[in-house]
Amino acid sequence: MCILGGAGGALGSMAGHRLGPAGLFVGGIAGGFLFVVAAGFLSERQHWIGQPQRLWAILGGSFGFVLACIVALATLASPIGPILSTLLIGAGAVFGALVGRSAHDPGLTSGGGGR
């Protein structure tokens, strides 16, 4: 998610640059969201997440991408901020995948002795 979301934002902004400053931002956001969705499907295909988790991972990654955009815009003076902000995409995807797990999945039972 981190790599594809960041790459999508970068490639989209490069493609949108031809349309001017507004195209730069719109292209970056559209490219980032598109690549986050692609990363969700790729993650399921690689069996890193289950099919029920895919939607939640995409939603979490998208929310992380929005946060990454805010951080990147606030730290444009340094390349470190925009690069590290892509970690928010992955963190959001992991959180979303955890939320999307069913309580009936193996390995999610409580460790305590129930009655």
Image (cartoon, rainbow, N blue to C red):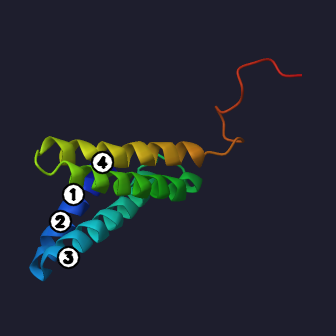
Residue at 66% over, 33% down: 108
The amino acid pointed to by label 4 is Cys
In this picture, residue 68 sits left or right of residue 73: right
Give the numbered dot on residue 2.
4
Give the numbered dot on residue 7.
1
Between discs 3 and 2, the one toward the N terminus: 2
Between discs 4 and 1, the one toward the N terminus: 4
Decide: is 32 above or below 83: below
Residue wearing tag 3: 22
Report, in whole angstroms, how far the alpha carbon at label 2 lies from the one at label 4.
14 Å
Image quadrant occupied by the C terminus: top right
The amino acid pointed to by label 1 is Ala
The amino acid pointed to by label 2 is Leu
Percent x, y of residue 103: 70, 41
Residue at 84% over, 22% down: 114
Q: Are marks 2 and 1 in contact (CB under 8 Å)?
A: yes
Decide: is 40 above or below 94: below
The amino acid pointed to by label 3 is Ala
Q: Secondary structure at mark 3?
A: helix
Residue at 41% over, 58% down: 62
Between discs 1 and 3, the one toward the N terminus: 1
Q: Secondary structure at mark 4?
A: helix
Give the numbered dot on residue 11.
2
Decide: is 25 above or below 89: below
Q: Residue furthest bottom?
A: 19
Q: Secondary structure at mark 2?
A: helix
Between discs 2 and 4, the one toward the N terminus: 4
112 or 70, which lies in front?
Answer: 70
Report, in whole angstroms, how far the alpha carbon at label 3 lies from the one at label 2.
15 Å
